[in-house]
Image (spheres, grey):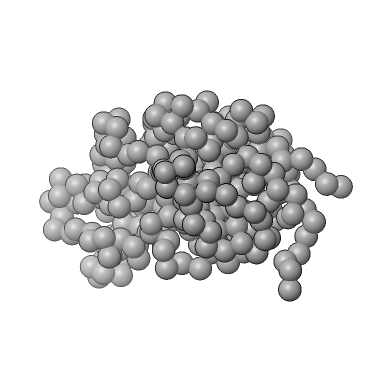
Amino acid sequence: MPTTLEAVVFDVDGTLAETERHGHRVAFNKAFEQQGYPYRWSDELYRELVKTTGGGRRIARYLTEFENFEPDEARAVAEKLHPIKTQLFVDTILAGEVPGRLGVGRFISSIQQAGIRTAVATTGTTSWVHPLVKHLSEEGGFEPFEVVVTGNEVANLKPAPDLFQEALRRLGLQPHQVVMVEDSRNGVRSAMATGGPCLAVRGEYALTEELEGADLIVDSYGDEASPLTVLSNPRELTVGPMLTPELLVELHRRRQEGGYRA
């Protein structure tokens, strides 16, 4: 039977804030430098590495593929470096250097005012995710998220559906009662694996990625001064200059109707 939209579940990196280029990448490089490693990740290289979810896994992949480390050695170095990188990133957050994406505070606030619950499901670790979402809430003027699920709380990271499934479990909802918001291919695949609808707000590190399966793809949340651009609209929604609760409700309704127009 048709249901109302009960909640919106957000990814964090690239979705709530453009954390990768000026946050995570910088922190990885600082960690390498502090520990005496000569490695520095360029923006171009990081665009490739970010396809691997989880910071520790990202370091291990880099060391094995680009620096010829044996897998066990790479994992050991990653286990040492990742906590250092995480603390450096937390310091960046607490210094107020990781702003939310344009329009995201307005969007989340409007969702909450419409009586729709909000949650987070991210591959990021608890140690930095909680400070970041707290900072974004204060900066953006919206209420804290009801549920926050992080990568160290599930068995499998995205593109597996575990994170969204755990968020749904804590919310007491089913996939057809929510809309999931993502920015990248792995995130969209994770949302799709739950069977629920997905809105994609393409992030800066996903510019060349195919986000097939998303019910709507836009380039930003939009605001009056900087309207969003629609990149794909398979549900043929009427989209204004910014994302709104009404648009989400309509996306949710059309997804329940089922099927794309041929």
- Give the farthest residue toward the right: 1
Question: What residue do we see at 42% from left, 47% from top?
Answer: 226
The mark tally for this picture is 0
| Residue 2, image x, y percentages | 83, 46
Can residue 123 be seen from the camera position used here?
Answer: no
Asked whether, in this view, residue 186 is left or right of residue 254, the answer is left
Question: What residue do we see at 42% from left, 37% from top?
Answer: 129
Quarter of image, res 188:
bottom right
- Of 55 and 228, nearer the camera is 228
| Residue 46, image x, y percentages | 30, 61
Asked whether, in this view, residue 18 is left or right of residue 22, the answer is right
Please identify the quadrant where the C terminus is shown.
Answer: bottom right
- Of 67 and 250, nearer the camera is 250
| Residue 187, image x, y percentages | 52, 56
* Above or below for 212 versus 95: below
* Above or below for 232 versus 173: below
Can residue 220 be seen from the camera position used here?
Answer: yes
* Above or below for 23 versus 183: above
| Residue 126, image x, y percentages | 44, 36
Asked whether, in this view, residue 72 is left or right of residue 218, the answer is left
Question: What residue do we see at 38% from left, 57% from top?
Answer: 204
- Give the farthest residue toward the front: 225
Question: What residue do we see at 60% from left, 48% from top?
Answer: 180
- Of 209 and 250, nearer the camera is 250
- Of 79 and 233, nearer the camera is 233
